[in-house]
């Protein structure tokens, strides 16, 4: 019931964010962004960041789009800027963070996203992986399919066909993330219900203490955050309630932000990047992002402390624990959930009518080990949630 409560708190934010993302994807084309990002200058970086922002998506969708941009001539740094912006400068992610954490974490998410982009830009300039980039470009085959010219936004928003396209994108957004969301919220509920505070105090050095952690404890927590995320297999949306639990258990701002930023260094992402670019480039990208997110998280921790705006967790005696909230009260969130449930049903109905009779019948590709793990974890999570809900009704 805690897992379901977490998801109920956040549903309207997911739906709103994916509606905005779907509208942008249908109304905005990508042809010009690919032509403008061929260099690694300030303009190309700014455009990569902006296009990533308007193309906000889950980590796995961002990987695919980044690969397409890089294969069609975008520079490595602007491509990384696009990937980081599309996964960190995300409207729906900021809303979900605001629901589960506090405004400081929302500011940290967006400011940290920009700092990550700046760090990656400097890192690539300093390391100059010219030979690696050349080898990867030779490996990639440019996509030869030209993008269809999009109808005007007025025509799209005033026709049934236009809203069917929006409905299709909306459903695709959910299809890309629902397993991560299901597993992530289930894990968060399990941890909230069963894992004692002593575990987090042992794992995250210096957490749970009334005294502010010292520099080495903050640095250690910022390093442990992405290590913990690496083994959770949870994407950026699914790990927010778990990040809130970490903060409730006394993990520092730096540790929590490092955990949130780690959606691009989890094992499935490393494996996908290896398939796209080869293991050398995948290791280069992962190492670069790990160094960047730890440095940015620690920098923001002390920067916020300098201005006196570091958030205080419930472990220090202020605020209420995330898992202690009344999830099912009738309030504004409850009304918004009902509205977005109705909107979701309407968009799904449009998507169902647009599907061709023979769609979805192709032969599936062989499943990798991580795919099997995800499927098994999804099935276990579904049984756990359904069983728990039925038991709660009986009791």
Image (cartoon, rainbow, N blue to C red):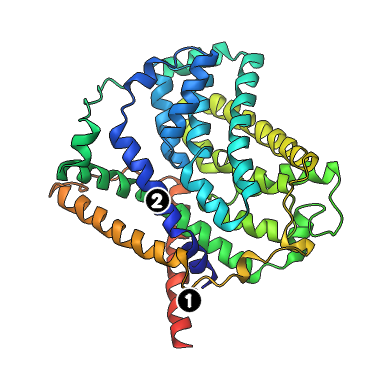
Does 13 appear above or below 284?
A: below
Indicate the secondary structure of the residue bearing disc 2.
helix
Does 185 appear above or below 263?
A: below
Q: Which one is in front in this view, the residue at disc 1 or the one at disc 2?
A: 2
Instruction: Find disc 2 in the rendering and name its residue.
Output: 16
Give me the residue at 72% from left, 43% from top: 222
Give me the residue at 42% from left, 63% from top: 379
Few, some or many residues within 10 Å of mark 1 (<14, 14–19, 20+): some
The numbered mark, 1 or 2, whose residue comes first in the sequence reads 2
Indicate the secondary structure of the residue bearing disc 1.
helix
Give me the residue at 44% from left, 13% from top: 38
Few, some or many residues within 10 Å of mark 2 (<14, 14–19, 20+): some
Please state the horizontal and vertical placement of residue 140, each as a whole percent of the image: 40, 20
Residue 388 tag number: 1
Viewer can see residue 352: yes
Please state the horizontal and vertical placement of residue 285, each as a whole percent of the image: 57, 28
Viewer can see residue 176: no
Please state the horizontal and vertical placement of residue 230, each as a whole percent of the image: 60, 45
* CA distance separating discs 1 and 2: 28 Å
Please state the horizontal and vertical placement of residue 202, each as a whole percent of the image: 79, 58
Give me the residue at 40% from left, 23% from top: 69
């Amino acid at each position: 019931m805690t897992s379901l409560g977490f998801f109920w708190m956040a549903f309207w934010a997911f739906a709103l964010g994916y509606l905005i993302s779907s509208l942008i994807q249908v109304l905005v084309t990508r042809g010009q962004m690919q032509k403008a990002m061929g260099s690694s200058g300030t303009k190309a970086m700014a455009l990569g960041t902006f296009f990533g922002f308007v193309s906000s998506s889950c980590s796995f969708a961002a990987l695919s789009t980044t690969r397409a941009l890089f294969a069609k001539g975008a520079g490595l740094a602007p491509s990384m800027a696009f990937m980081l912006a599309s996964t960190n400068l995300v409207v729906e992610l900021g809303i979900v963070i605001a629901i589960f954490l506090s405004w400081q974490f929302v500011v940290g998410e967006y400011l940290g996203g920009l700092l990550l982009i700046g760090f990656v830009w400097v890192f690539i300039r300093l390391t100059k992986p010219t030979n690696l980039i050349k080898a990867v470009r030779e490996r990639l085959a440019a996509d030869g399919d030209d993008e269809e010219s999009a109808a005007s936004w007025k025509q799209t928003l005033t026709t049934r066909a236009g809203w069917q396209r929006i409905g299709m994108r909306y459903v695709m957004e959910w299809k890309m993330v629902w397993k991560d969301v299901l597993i992530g919220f289930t894990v968060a509920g399990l941890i909230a219900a069963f894992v004692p505070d002593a575990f987090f105090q042992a794992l995250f050095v210096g957490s749970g203490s009334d005294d502010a952690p010292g520099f080495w404890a903050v640095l250690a927590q910022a390093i442990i955050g992405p290590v913990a995320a690496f083994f959770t297999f949870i994407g950026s949306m699914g790990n927010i309630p778990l990040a809130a639990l970490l903060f409730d258990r006394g993990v520092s701002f730096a540790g929590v932000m490092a955990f949130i930023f780690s959606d691009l260094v989890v094992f499935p992402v490393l494996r996908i990047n290896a398939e796209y670019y080869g293991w050398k480039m995948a290791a280069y990208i992962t190492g670069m992002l790990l160094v960047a997110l730890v440095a940015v998280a620690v920098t923001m921790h002390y920067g916020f402390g300098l201005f006196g705006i570091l958030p205080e967790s419930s472990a220090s005696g202020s605020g209420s624990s995330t898992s202690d909230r009344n999830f099912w009260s009738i309030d504004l969130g409850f009304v918004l959930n009902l509205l977005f449930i109705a909107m979701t049903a309407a968009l799904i109905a449009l998507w169902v009518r647009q599907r061709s009779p023979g769609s979805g019948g192709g032969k599936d590709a062989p499943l990798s080990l991580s795919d099997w793990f995800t499927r098994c974890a999804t099935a276990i999570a579904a049984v756990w949630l359904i069983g728990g809900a039925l038991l709660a009704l009986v009791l």
